[in-house]
Amino acid sequence: MENQIHFCTCKDLNCKLNPNNHNLGCDPCIKKNLKAGEIPGCFFNLVSDDLSQLNEFTLESFADFFHKNKENVQKS
């Protein structure tokens, strides 16, 4: 992500909601996720870079993902 212009940690640069693809910041992504009852991928990326074990981004899946990977949580 060398050309990244926003701090967003989402690796899906083809997503139209990725802040690197518009000037609206994180709002469109967060609004979409809240409406779907989900959490943005950037929260999961804070826990681990390996999201391969995920098939959904719900609150419950985030809690499970966090508990399974909490030793990897990056400290700011």
Image: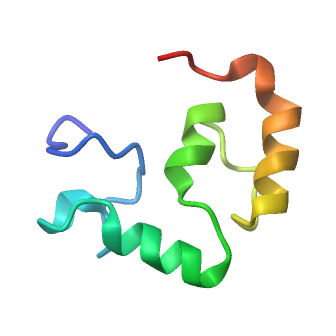
Side of 70 relative to 23 (left or right) = right
* Colouring scheme applied when the structure was drawn: rainbow
Rendered image quadrant of residue 13: bottom left
Look at the picture and state if 61 lies above or below 15.
Answer: above
In the image: residue 33, left or right of residue 61 = left
Q: Position of residue 21 (x, y in %)?
A: 18, 66
Q: Residue at 40% of width from left, 69% of height from top? A: 29
From the top left corner, tell me how far across and down residue 42 is, in percent: 50, 48
Q: Is residue 73 left or right of residue 54?
A: left
- The mark total stands at 0
Residue 72 image offset from top left, x and y in percent = 70, 20
The vertical placement of 37 against 7, above or below, is below
Q: Position of residue 22 (x, y in %)?
A: 15, 68
- Visible in this render: residue 48? no
Q: Nearer the viewer, residue 45 or 37?
A: 37
Q: In percent of the image, x 65 and y 33: which residue is there?
A: 47
- Up-down: is 59 above or below 51? below
Residue 18, located in which quarter of the rendered image? bottom left
One can see residue 53 in this view: yes
> Does residue 6 appear left or right of residue 76 in this picture?
left
Residue in the image at 57% along x and 20% along y = 74
| Quadrant for the N terminus in the image | top left
Which residue lies at the image location 11% right of the left edge and 65% below the top edge? 23
